[in-house]
Image: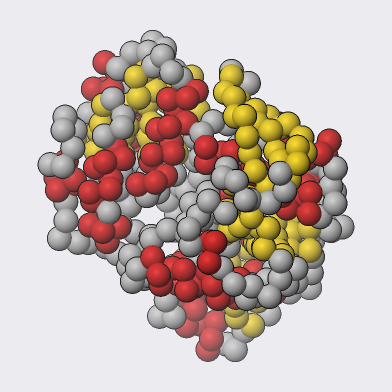
């Protein structure tokens, strides 16, 4: 048996893929930085070997899977190519692996991870299912019928996939370091649509997705009339959100999900549409109700003095709006305190006005320094440029999180795609 070596095994997608191969009986190891990243916890639970980056890791007989964050000049990649080892980029290998199953690619500018998690949860409660979720969660099953995976549009990597089905949640302008415009993003999704083999489940409330052309049936879901699957009569309670589903204007079933906000209803509606299309009964789909959530997506901790701490990956203005909306609906009697760390200089510069508008929907706003990603080390923008656009916003520095203690009986939203968790952890250590 070959041993698969993952270069950058702690990446969210890489960690999940390593777990899937391990669960499927393959030999797996990988390398990465030595700093702790939350994705490594699941790898260690499965005794998957994690090595520090070193070209000495690369030996004869390995099959290499390299993370997309690393260029061809990385010493481990150079060594692998010198030895002539079988070599894949993450998205290339994932595309080949998916062909073993009835595959469902979940894609969109926002909502991919939550929707992938919700679909994986509901399917696996009914049939053997493998899944790859973008929060670092991966699960393989030797007898899987379905493979559910998150498909990212960045650099058009999702064009390596030829899934049986695709769920498309929305099209929006993001990743301005690569995409030129929302039309460029649409072009990528249009190309992806032509790769799908059986059917597309798309949000009909999205003006761009309405224009998608495909060789397979496109089933639309949403709130507006004319969608194949429509959600009506939405009610929120302590249990979550309950809504009626109509299939082509005929009442189908009532469902409850444990989450809040219109975006959560849309995510659920896409799962309901896919499973109903695949022949599952309403009773089987009701397992939506027991979904425990995914990592770093509205992850809650009850704290002291009536505080609720929420860790969320929101790093785009629309995601911030959705997270604040969810918090208000779940905790209508508490102040909403936004603690936000922008992710990448290009995104912050591109959407600075939209960030200001979205964050202003919170009652109090704290801003952390911009997080520079592995692909973008610096920029000529600072957090002060965003602060100037938001009335009452304050800067939050490491070592000063005690200021958050004044917000008793409040919801503290720690939002960002970088290392915003360090601020939450520091705050917890004050107790």
Where is the N terminus found, in terms of image quarters? bottom right
Tell me where residue 91 sits by quadrant.
bottom right
Q: Is residue 307 left or right of residue 256?
A: left
Q: How many marks?
A: 0
Residue name at image x 35 percent, y 68 percent? 181
Q: Position of residue 147 (x, y in %)?
A: 74, 59
Q: Quadrant of the C terminus?
A: top left
Which residue lies at the image location 27% right of the left edge and 54% below the top edge? 351
Farthest residue to the top: give it.
305
Compared across the picture, whether 150 is left or right of 428 comes to: right
Figure quadrant of residue 399 = top left
User: Quadrant location of residue 224?
Assistant: top right
Image: 396 above or below 158? above
Foreground residue among 347 and 265: 265
The residue lying toward the viewer, choosing from 3 and 37, is 37
The residue nearer to you, when weighing 100 against 377, is 100
Q: How is the image coloured?
A: secondary structure
Q: Residue at x 38, y 39 (%)?
A: 321
Residue 208 pos. (x, y %) = 48, 62
Image height of 358 relative to 128, above or below: above
Viewer can see residue 99 = yes
- Which residue is pictured at 40% across the width and 70% down the height? 183
Residue 335 at what x, y percent from top left?
A: 34, 19
Regarding residue 372, the answer to whether it shows in the image is no
Q: Residue 390 location, x and y as percent?
A: 18, 37
């Amino acid at each position: 048996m070959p041993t698969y070596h993952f270069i950058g095994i702690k990446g969210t997608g890489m960690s999940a893929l390593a777990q899937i191969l391990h669960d499927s009986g393959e030999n797996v190891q990988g390398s990465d930085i030595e700093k702790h990243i939350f994705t490594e916890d699941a790898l260690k639970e499965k005794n998957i070997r994690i090595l520090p980056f070193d070209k000495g890791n690369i030996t004869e007989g390995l099959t290499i899977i390299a993370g997309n964050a690393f260029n061809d000049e990385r010493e481990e990649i150079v060594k692998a190519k010198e030895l002539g080892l079988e070599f894949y980029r993450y998205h290339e290998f994932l595309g080949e692996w998916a062909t073993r199953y009835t595959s469902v690619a979940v894609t969109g500018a926002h909502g991919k991870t939550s929707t992938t998690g919700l679909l994986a949860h509901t399917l696996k409660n009914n049939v053997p299912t493998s899944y790859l979720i973008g929060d670092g969660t991966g699960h393989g099953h030797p007898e899987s019928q379905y493979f559910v995976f998150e498909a990212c549009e960045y650099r058009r990597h999702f064009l390596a996939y030829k899934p049986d089905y695709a769920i498309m949640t929305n099209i929006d302008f993001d990743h301005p370091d690569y995409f030129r415009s929302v039309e460029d993003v649409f072009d990528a999704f249009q190309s992806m649509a032509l790769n799908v083999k059986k059917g597309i489940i798309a949000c009909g409330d999205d003006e761009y997705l309405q224009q998608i052309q495909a060789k397979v049936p496109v089933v639309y879901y949403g709130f507006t009339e004319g969608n194949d699957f429509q959600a009506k009569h939405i009610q929120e309670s302590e249990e979550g959100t309950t809504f009626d589903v109509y299939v082509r204007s005929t009442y189908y079933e009532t469902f409850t999900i444990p989450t809040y906000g219109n975006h959560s209803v849309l995510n659920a509606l896409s799962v309901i549409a896919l499973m109903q299309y695949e022949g599952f009964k309403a009773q089987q789909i009701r397992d939506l109700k027991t979904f425990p959530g995914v990592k770093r997506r509205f992850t809650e901790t009850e704290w002291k003095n009536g505080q609720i701490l929420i860790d969320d990956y929101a790093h785009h203005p629309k995601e911030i709006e959705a997270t604040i909306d969810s918090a208000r609906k779940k905790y209508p009697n508490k102040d909403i305190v936004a603690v936000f760390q922008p992710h990448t200089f290009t995104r912050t510069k591109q959407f600075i006005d939209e960030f200001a508008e979205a964050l202003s929907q919170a009652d109090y706003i704290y801003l952390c320094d911009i997080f520079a990603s592995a692909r973008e080390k610096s920029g000529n923008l600072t957090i002060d440029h965003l602060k100037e656009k938001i009335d009452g916003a304050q800067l939050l520095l490491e070592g000063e999180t005690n200021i958050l203690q004044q917000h008793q009986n409040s919801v503290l939203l720690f939002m960002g795609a970088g290392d915003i968790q360090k601020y939450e952890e520091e705050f917890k250590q004050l107790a």
